[in-house]
Image (tube, grey):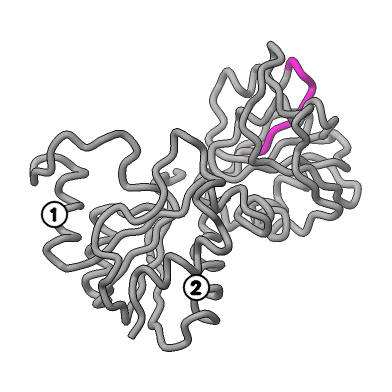
Amino acid sequence: MIKVNEIIQAIESFAPPELAENWDNVGLLVGDGEQTVERVFLCLDATSEVVKEAVAFGANMIISHHPLFISPVPRIIEQDVTGRIIRALARNDISLYAAHTNFDSAPGGLCEILTQKLELRNSRKFTAEECLDEFGKPTMNFGHVSSCAPTTLAELTKFVQAKLNTVGIRYVGDPNRKIETVATCCGGGSDMLFAAYRAEADVLVTGDVKYHGAQLATEFGVAMIDAGHFETEVMFCEFMREFLGKKFPALEIENSNTRGFFNIC
């Protein structure tokens, strides 16, 4: 019999919780470490819809990338969104585990998986000297800088859209700009713009680019491709399914069918 704690131990041998940012909330969030697991359900976010999918699958454990909650939960009631999800997990005896920024920054983790998905070469993490904000203060370091075959920003944008299956994609910069050096950061990585600039990257591929982030990128002369938060991280499920399948062949593992929240008209 496979226990929740055994699965956690396997995941954390790859992505130790010590790698998580101090503001993050990773690990077993709901449930029992001694619970027996036969079926695991994988998702990016443990939403109400995902919990329904997991219940239909007969899951004993959900493994998500994003934590269900980061700040302390003051109450667990049906009338609150988070409380309703926690109650549904408890009613259906489903444990919930999250591997977030520890999985992002782990060697071979999500930031590296993104570079592989985009077929980039000579990838390396940003250096500490590159990860400074505009005032010289240290920033988080989740990104990578890589090389690609010479192309244009417009062509690279189309390639990223195809590889990540992004429904709608935005980019900042001259479409005819020559691109050879690509910075990447999965999820909402606009804050890595300064690192991309210091690394002399031609473009930063990430998600959740805001208006003023695009304005700043223009001022710095760094192009940006907003490929979507969901689309740059959903590979978490693909990786985890293969990883756990090799570690625990007896487990039944399923991925959520949910997609990103945005529609494009």
Q: Quadrant of residue 174?
A: top right
Q: Which residue is pictured at 54% across the width and 37% down the height? A: 188
Furthest toward the left, the residue is 78
Say whether residue 29 is left or right of residue 192: left
SS for dot 2: helix
Q: Secondary structure at mark 1?
A: helix
Q: Which mark is residue 251?
A: none
* Span colored in magenta: 219-225
- Vertical order, 209 against 86 (above or below): above
Q: Which residue is mark 1?
A: 87
Quadrant hosting residue 178: top right
Q: Amino acid at mark 1?
A: Arg
Q: Residues within 10 Å of mark 1 (few under 14, many from 20)?
A: some
Say the numbered circle drawn on residue 241: 2
Residue 43 image point, x, y percent: 40, 60
- The picture places residue 125, in percent across and down from the top left corner, at 75, 44
- Give residue 265's position: percent from left, percent from top: 44, 43
State the residue at coordinates (85%, 30%). Answer: 200
Residue type beneath disc 2 = Arg
Question: Does 35 lie within the magenta span?
Answer: no
Left or right of 43, for residue 89:
left
- Which of the 4 image quadrants contains residue 139? top right
x, y percent for residue 21: 51, 38
As drawn, the residue found furthest toward the right would be 150
Say whether residue 259 is visible. no
- Does the image show residue 264? yes
Cα distance in 3D space between marks 2 and 1: 26 Å
What residue is rendered at 24% in x and 61% in y?
31
On the rendered structure, is 145 left or right of 249?
right
Instruction: Tell me which residue sits at (72%, 54%) in the image.
Output: 115
